[in-house]
Amino acid sequence: MDIMGEPKIQTWLKRIQQAGCTCRKITPVHILNKRNGEFLFGLFTTSVTDDEGRELLPYLLIRGDACVVVPLLKNSGTAEEKFVMVLQRRIGNGHMSLEFPAGMLDRNVDTPKAVMISELHEETGITVSEEALIPLTDKPMYTSPGLHDEAIHLYACEIDMNDAEFKSLEGRLTGSRQEGENIQVTLKSPQEAKAQATSAQVRLALFLFEEWRSAR
């Protein structure tokens, strides 16, 4: 496999160049692949200088970009509004994590909306169009650029549902078992989401969603 030709790595190289930096060397230390053999994550040592010739720190974890959607459901029968969220246990702390539907772009680096539509359906059973996804920022948000390249594409989505559809979502079990996903769908009010979320990504998404709604 030509590791340097992987879309995630090429995206990082383009961003480094666009920022005025020069990559003189990038060396794989350890590569993790998906079950199908595709590149997943990689730890690298690098030699990168900024536009004034100063060396950047030499360690880099390439994860690639991800996408997150904040879906607000509107019950057409009762006028109730709740976020559709997911619960899953995470390896980083072992706890159940309350999150918005999300996914990695993998090799689909140029189609975040298409990936988000697929992930939303996979994790909740809900299908939306690309037009229904509204960007919450004018550019992706980086999560920890001191070590890795991951940038998050954040979207909002408002979905009307009848009462039966609305109620059927609570407790729905989804996710790809082949990828170790055991996901439970849940509906949360904005107050519940803020009180129960332990993810900084969720709190950022909630903040951006509230800004977006108040600006309309």
Image (cartoon, rainbow, N blue to C red):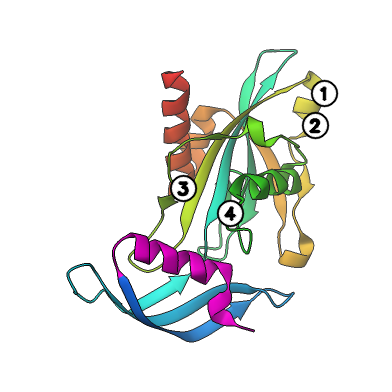
The image shows residue 195, relative to residue 210, as above or below, that is: below
Marks 3 and 1, how far apart at CA: 30 Å
Name the residue type under label 3. Answer: Gln
Name the residue type under label 1. Answer: Ala
Which mark sits nearer the N-terminus, 3 or 2?
A: 2
Name the residue type under label 2. Answer: Ser
Q: Quadrant of the N terminus?
A: bottom right
Callout 1 touching callout 2 (CB < 8 Å): yes
Q: Which residue is mark 2?
A: 168
Marks 4 and 3, how far apart at CA: 22 Å
* Mark 4 closeness class: few <14, some 14–19, many ≥20 residues within 10 Å: few
Q: Is residue 75 left or right of residue 20?
A: right
Q: Is residue 74 left or right of residue 163?
A: left
Helix, strand or loop status at disc 1 = helix
Which mark sits nearer the N-terminus, 4 or 1?
A: 4
The residue drawn where x is 71% and y is 65% is 180
Indicate the position of residue 169 as horizontal and vertical percent values: 76, 34
Name the residue type under label 4. Answer: Asp
Magenta span of residues: 1-21
Callout 3 touching callout 2 (CB < 8 Å): no
- Say which of marks 4 and 1 sits in front: 4
Q: Which residue is mark 1?
A: 164
Q: Which residue is mark 3?
A: 201
Marks 4 and 1, how far apart at CA: 36 Å
* Mark 2 closeness class: few <14, some 14–19, many ≥20 residues within 10 Å: few
Query: Would you say the magenta stretch is mainly helix, strand or loop?
Result: helix
User: Can I make out residue 198 in this image?
Assistant: no
Mark seen at residue 110? 4
Helix, strand or loop status at disc 2 = helix
Q: Is residue 105 left or right of residue 167?
A: left
Helix, strand or loop status at disc 4 = loop
